[in-house]
Image: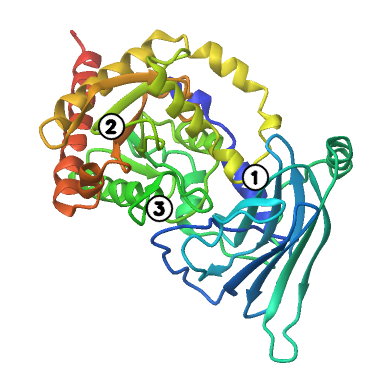
Amino acid sequence: MAGRANHIVGLGLALASAAAVLCGSPGTGRAADESPRPEVVGSFPVASDVRVAGDEKQTRFILDLDKKIALRAFALADPYRVVVDIPQVNFRLDAGAGTVARGLIKAFRYGLVMPGGSRIVFDLAGPAKIKNAYALDPANGQPARLVIELESIDRTAFVQALAVENRPDLRPAIGPVAIPATVVAMAAPKPADDPRPVVVLDPGHGGIDNGTQAGGEAEKSLVLSFGLALRDRIEKAGKYRVVMTRTDDTFIPLGDRVKIARNQSAALFVSIHADALPRGEGDAQGATVYTLSDKASDAEAERLADSENKADAIGGVNLTEEPTDVADILIDLAQRETRTFSNRFARLVVGEMKTTARMHKHPLKSAGFRVLKAPDVPSVLIELGYVSNKDDLQQLMSENWRSKTVGAVAQAIDGFFAKRLVSASPGN
């Protein structure tokens, strides 16, 4: 475990840069049909209504606000998207506000992507340019407004426009903001005077990325509740130091989740999700535990990994600028020790969870999840159940089920470290 410290990634520098950027220019948006939508503490601008008008040639998006805000808009390709960065906003829009297609806009999402920054992402019906993007002061009894005007163009013109813009990085449009202590803590390496193993808990999705949704419930909220309850249970025992990738409704890019684990010299990484089967593909139920594999164990695992790995596209992240060390990480994944530990922990989780939760008929699977690609940190991804299944969703919403299943996962963590400590003891 000591050798893992050698792999610390500069997440602290990255977050420090983000903090500096927060003192700069335009910001970020939020996801459309979130449910529930927790109130954001603070005197942030409030978005109260939204309208989309126009046709496939020209389309206008109007957002009503209680005060004028700065903005920055840019386009991304493959898929065609327009991203609008704004300061942190409380969105109080009707459920499903971004799901109705109109003109050039197929759908839009809105959400928090970093402290102080929100983002709106438009999925486009085809290539389009941002003809105008501006904010209006309140006037003549009308509220302040954010207006985005889109105009259809051909792909060649679209790509040429992207080259000129150079796909700028996210820059929130507000003044200095205080970075929450939880985010700062994630940037700091493991304290040298704390010998306890570090367990990183990773509630999936967040902010603009709702994850799967059904019955008025969003995956991001269900898994965050589970992750926080698991953290509390583990911390109560005091045997491990727990680090969360997120503790609120914030968007965390997939690569940063891995960096957090490596920066903390984590001894275990547990990503928490809830699946959903697409309509028309039948029904499925039960919890599943995934480990990393270059080749998915079955078609369902491949589908899930593909959908999860596209999470950054939801937030408007430019995935073409993948770090060069990804190739090295893929090679390092051949390390037998990490995979062996991951597989053993996955079996322990299944063994404990089957006493408290309904399990999938094939509960142990593998796929190429980006979030599991730390080469030196044993990692698993737990799908707690299917939000698309009525019985599973009812369980996911049950505090009694959550308490029992949290206990089962905590027991598996104890079992994992007990065997590692025994095998590392002298004479073993």
Residue 372 location (% of width, % of height):
44, 26
Residue type pointed to by label 3: Thr
- State the quadrant of the C terminus: top left
Q: Which residue is depicted at the point 28% across and 32% down?
A: 284
Residue type pointed to by label 2: Ala
Q: Is residue 132 above or below residue 283?
A: below
Q: Is residue 130 above or below residue 382?
A: below
Inter-mark Cα distance, 2 to 1: 30 Å
Task: Using residue 406 as the reference point, say whether residue 164 is left or right of it.
Answer: right
Q: How dense is the environment of label 3, judged by Cα within 10 Å: few (below 14), some, or many (20 and up)?
A: some
Q: Mark 2 or mark 3: name the one nearer the start of the chain.
A: 3
- Quick one: SS at disc 1? loop
Inter-mark Cα distance, 3 to 1: 22 Å
Task: Using residue 227 as the reference point, say whether residue 189 is left or right of it.
Answer: right
Q: Mark 2 or mark 1: name the one nearer the start of the chain.
A: 2
Q: Viewer-proximal residue, 366 or 281?
A: 281
Disc 3 and disc 1 in contact, CB within 8 angstroms: no
- State the quadrant of the N terminus: top left
Q: Which residue is depicted at the point 51% across and 13% down?
A: 332
Which dot marks residue 284?
2
Q: Which residue lies under the disc numbered 3? A: 247
